[in-house]
Amino acid sequence: QVQLVQSGAEVKKPGASVKVACKASGYTFRNYGIAWVRQAPGQGLECLGWINVYNGNKKYAQHLQDRVTMTTDTSTSTAYLELGSLRSDDTAVYYCARAVPVRGVWGGMDGWGQGTTVTVSS
Amino acid sequence: EIVMTQSPATLSVSPGERATLSCRASQSVSSDLAWYQQKPGQTPRLLIYGASTRPAGVPGRFSGSGSGTDFALTISGLQSEDFAIYYCQQYNNWPWTFGLGTKVEIK
């Protein structure tokens, strides 16, 4: 079955960068996308971006465009999220999720990683 | 950006009763809508995609309806494990956006 296993919790100082890994198994990695979603403490869900693993096309949330990079390594079925110039309001749980096409439209997320807590604090 | 508005914010329901959750989009999203369930301390779980399709393994008491701008998630015969927060999400336009959630609590 679909399994996404994320790297461990991170504590960073403001201005630093963080890189979160998401290793996929149980399916053909190249046939799907990987989305990244975060959830600030006590808050709802925010989609940061997604990457089509097959062709490498990416979409980022506009307000993060200059700070975020999403990549994949198909040799290890691993996706990465890198977020730079961290601020305190980046403190959140970061999830990777498998993005699937529904009637030709990408966007359902049918498998989720366990989440990585990123804390930004001086 | 498409704004997703969920109502009510909190729904108090007795076990065994039916719950109906609403989700409205600020512009048409066709049927490109998903519902997720999230329990405290857990990962979101996909319940419905394409506005009305259940993935394998999702119980039949969960049903989705609607298209365009107005959608609903109905949970028939609420069970104890259904008390959670439910989010709708549109994927018709980038950025994909979520509603703020409806918390279903025990009455």
Image: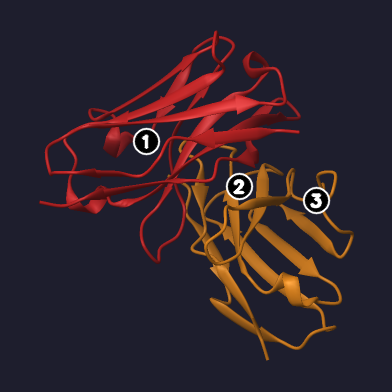
Chain colours: A red, B orange
Query: Badge 3: few (under 14), some or many (20 or more) residues near its Cα, within 10 Å?
Result: many
**Residue depicted at x 58% and y 50%:** B89
Foreground label between 2 and 3: 3
Query: Badge 2: few (under 14), some or many (20 or more) residues near its Cα, within 10 Å?
Result: some
First in sequence, mark 2 or 3: give its number. 2
State left or right for residue A118 relative to residue A55. left
**Residue depicted at x 79% and y 85%:** B15
Image mark for residue B28: 2
Q: Chain of mark 1?
A: A
Query: What type is the residue that disc 3 sits on?
Result: Ser
Foreground label between 1 and 2: 1
Q: Which residue is mark 3?
A: B52
Position of the N terminus of chain A by quadrant: top right
- Numbered label tally: 3
Q: CA distance from mark 2 to mark 3?
A: 16 Å
Q: Nearer the viewer, residue B23 or A55?
A: A55
Q: Position of residue B49 (x, y in %)?
A: 73, 45
Q: Chain of mark 2?
A: B
Vertical placement of residue A111 versus B3, above or below: above
Vertical placement of residue A63 versus A28, above or below: below
Are the two marked residues, 1 and 3, in contact with CB atoms closer than 8 angstroms?
no
Query: Badge 1: few (under 14), some or many (20 or more) residues near its Cα, within 10 Å?
Result: some
Residues marked 1 and 2, same chain:
no
Q: Nearer the viewer, residue B2 or B83?
A: B83
Image mark for residue B85: none
Q: Which residue is mark 1?
A: A61
State left or right for residue B58 relative to residue A43. right
